[in-house]
Image: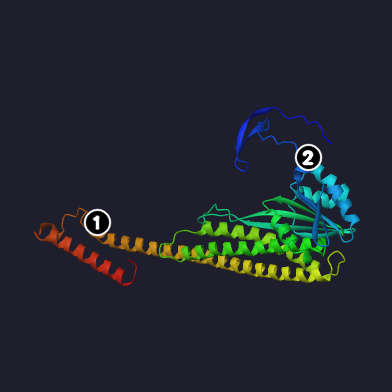
């Protein structure tokens, strides 16, 4: 079904980094978006029977074909669909409007909801942003979202943002028909397992940044690393916001009996929950370490300021000696015995130098200089 669209007037062109191409600009300064149909947002749609891929069809035909086969189900993957695209899918698969609205708007917290005979799971994905060295403006992690609709004979996966593609998950499952034979629940397990494994990989990469920052803070030539520490702390908070809320949905999936999940897949999901616990514990450790680095950095700054103040005070005390003596002889008194004495001037210089050297040695002995 095709519809005519009225494009806004074009006013210029813009180079978009992500696409690497020139895009036209409309009157409001935004890049003009090409009109997409539902087929454009469908990454893959296949029918599986007894753990094996039997057909690749459009969504409606895929669901009809899956329901003809005992134990068959349809698996459809969508990438950033708009409301009209997902409305067509929702009509075919009978998805609840509230869940569809969440899947379109994205920016949801990880959660698990049941709408009739359908489970709706939201997962946050994490991608490590490569960088040579952590700076005050470095982006360490980037988040995306996966929305999973799970029914008795279908699984619909909606991907948003920087969430990595699921083609490797699909290929891995297709190479394990004995696991895929468990139906849509096996797909749910494979996706959550891959997402949590990605959490572990990102945690390993973040640990390198933490170690690097720790070395810099306690190095002999350390500087003011407070901004870098705050940046890493913000990125860790973003990481935690994706990981921590996911614990409750995984616990419900693995512990609460559900006919869509099954006991066997539930055991696999418990293993995923254990891995998520490891990630949460590591993030807690990183958070405590970064807090300690911030406290250590502030303490070092306070100590350095103390040292600087002592050096300034010592220098001022040494300079006060010749200033005091010069002040005495600048009072213009008429009767000063040393004024008429031929050795008065060298004696004054000698006394000034001697007192200054003694004061300098005393400050050196006490570590002020």
Toward which corner of the image does residue 112 lie, by quadrant?
Answer: bottom right
- Quadrant holding the C terminus: bottom left
Q: In the depicted view, which residue is nearer to us: 117 or 135?
A: 117
Q: Which residue is mark 2?
A: 37
Residue 94, can we see it? no
154 relative to 197 in the view: left or right = right
Residue 82, numbered circle: none
Dot 2 or dot 1, earlier in sequence = 2
CA distance separating discs 2 and 1:
91 Å
Any part of residue 181 in sight: yes
Q: In the rendered view, would you say 264 is above or below 352?
A: below
Q: Position of residue 113 (x, y in %)?
A: 83, 59
Which numbered dot is residue 327? 1
- In the picture, measured across the screen, residue 89 lies left or right of residue 350, that is right
Q: Residue at x 65, y 32 (%)?
A: 24
Quadrant in which the N terminus is drawn? top right
| Residue under the point 90% across and 55% down | 67
Q: Nearer the viewer, residue 52 or 37?
A: 52
Say which residue appears at 87% left-offset and 52% top-offset: 63
User: What is the x, y in percent for residue 367?
Assistant: 34, 70
Judge left or right: residue 30 versus residue 118.
left
- Name the colour scheme: rainbow
For the image, the number of numbered tags is 2
Q: Residue at x 78, y 43 (%)?
A: 39
Res 141 → quadrant: bottom right
SS assignment at label 1: helix
């Amino acid at each position: 079904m095709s519809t005519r669209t009225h494009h806004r007037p074009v006013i210029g062109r813009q180079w978009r980094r992500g696409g690497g191409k020139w895009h036209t600009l409309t009157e409001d300064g935004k890049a003009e978006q090409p009109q997409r149909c539902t087929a454009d947002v469908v990454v893959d749609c296949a029918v599986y029977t007894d753990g094996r891929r039997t057909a690749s069809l459009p969504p409606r035909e895929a669901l009809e074909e899956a329901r003809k086969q005992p134990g068959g189900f349809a698996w459809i993957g969508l990438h950033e669909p708009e409301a009209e695209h997902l409305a067509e899918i929702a009509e075919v698969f009978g998805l609840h409007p509230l869940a569809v609205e969440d899947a379109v708007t994205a920016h949801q917290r990880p959660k698990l909801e049941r709408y009739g005979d359908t489970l709706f799971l939201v997962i946050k994905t994490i991608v490590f942003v490569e960088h040579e060295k952590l700076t005050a403006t470095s982006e360490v992690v980037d988040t995306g979202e996966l929305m999973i609709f799970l029914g008795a004979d279908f699984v619909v996966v909606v991907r948003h943002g920087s969430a990595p593609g699921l083609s490797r998950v699909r290929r891995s499952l297709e190479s394990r028909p004995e696991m895929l034979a468990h139906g849509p629940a096996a797909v749910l397990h494979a996706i959550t397992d891959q997402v949590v494994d990605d959490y572990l990989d990102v945690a390993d990469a973040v640990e390198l940044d933490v170690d690097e920052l720790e070395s810099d803070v306690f190095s002999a030539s350390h500087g003011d690393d407070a901004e870098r520490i705050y940046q890493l702390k913000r990125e860790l908070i973003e990481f935690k916001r994706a990981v921590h809320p996911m614990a409750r949905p995984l616990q419900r999936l693995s512990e609460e009996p559900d006919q869509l999940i099954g006991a066997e897949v539930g055991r696999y999901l418990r293993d995923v929950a254990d891995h998520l616990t490891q990630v949460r514990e590591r993030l807690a450790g990183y958070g405590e370490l970064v807090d300690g680095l911030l406290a250590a950095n502030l303490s070092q700054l306070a100590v350095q300021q103390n040292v600087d103040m002592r050096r300034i005070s010592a220098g001022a005390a040494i300079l006060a000696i010749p200033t005091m003596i010069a002040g005495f002889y600048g009072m213009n008194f008429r009767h000063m015995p040393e004024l008429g004495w031929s050795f008065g001037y060298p004696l004054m210089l000698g006394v000034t130098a001697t007192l200054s050297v003694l004061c300098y040695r005393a400050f050196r002995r006490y570590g002020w200089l």
